């Protein structure tokens, strides 16, 4: 009798482990993917340290963003995104859509682009080069 209970409890533990493991590997939609290929990881530091950590300037980041999305710059800032130092450049295009371009602060590569729709929602597009 005791052996049967141990078998039932063991089976339950294994089944629960498989469900939890499967859920952790479940695919999320593109809007919730994280930036994982930045070159400057942000350890626990303050925003005041960010400018000294960046390897490219605001002007260089803006030029990279404008090369990817034609338009005019609304705003640009240096910030932490998913654990990496990036420039976030907001550009308004000729069709009046606003696109956020994430530029790696280390090498100037475009990490992600996110276009706001008319209802204020945004969709993130990845650069998978």
Image (spheres, rainbow, N blue to C red):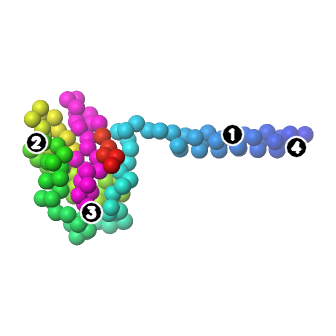
* Left or right: residue 32 compared with residue 60: right
Identify the residue at horizontal 26%, vertical 41% (top origin). 114
Dot label at residue 3: 4
Q: Position of residue 99 (x, y in %)?
A: 20, 41
- Sequence-earlier tag: 2 or 4: 4
- Find the distance from the CA under tag 2 to the CA under tag 1: 53 Å
The residue where tag 3 is placed is: 106
* Left or right: residue 93 compared with residue 120: left
* Left or right: residue 31 compared with residue 23: left
Q: Is residue 109 magenta?
A: yes
- Find the distance from the CA under tag 3 to the CA under tag 1: 44 Å
Dot label at residue 15: 1
- Sequence-earlier tag: 3 or 4: 4
Q: Position of residue 61 (x, y in %)?
A: 18, 56
Q: Tell which of 63 and 51 is nearer to you.
A: 63
Judged from this view, the residue extending furthest toward the top is: 119
- Sequence-earlier tag: 3 or 1: 1
Q: Tell which of 123 and 50 is nearer to you.
A: 123
Magenta part of the chain: 101-123
Identify the residue at horizontal 21%, vertical 44% (top origin). 100
Q: Nearer the viewer, mark 2 or mark 1?
A: 2
Q: Nearer the viewer, mark 3 or mark 4?
A: 3
């Amino acid at each position: 009798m005791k052996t049967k209970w141990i078998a039932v409890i063991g089976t339950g533990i294994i089944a629960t482990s498989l469900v939890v493991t499967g859920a952790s590997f479940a695919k999320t939609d593109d809007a919730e993917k994280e930036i994982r290929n930045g070159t400057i990881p942000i350890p626990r530091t303050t925003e005041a340290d960010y400018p000294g950590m960046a390897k490219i300037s605001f002007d260089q980041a803006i030029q990279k963003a404008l090369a990817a999305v034609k338009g005019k710059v609304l705003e640009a800032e240096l910030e932490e995104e998913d654990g990496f130092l990036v420039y976030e450049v907001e550009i308004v295009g000729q069709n009046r859509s606003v696109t956020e371009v994430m530029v790696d602060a280390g090498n100037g590569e475009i990490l992600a682009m996110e276009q706001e729709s008319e209802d204020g929602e945004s969709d993130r597009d990845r650069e998978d080069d």
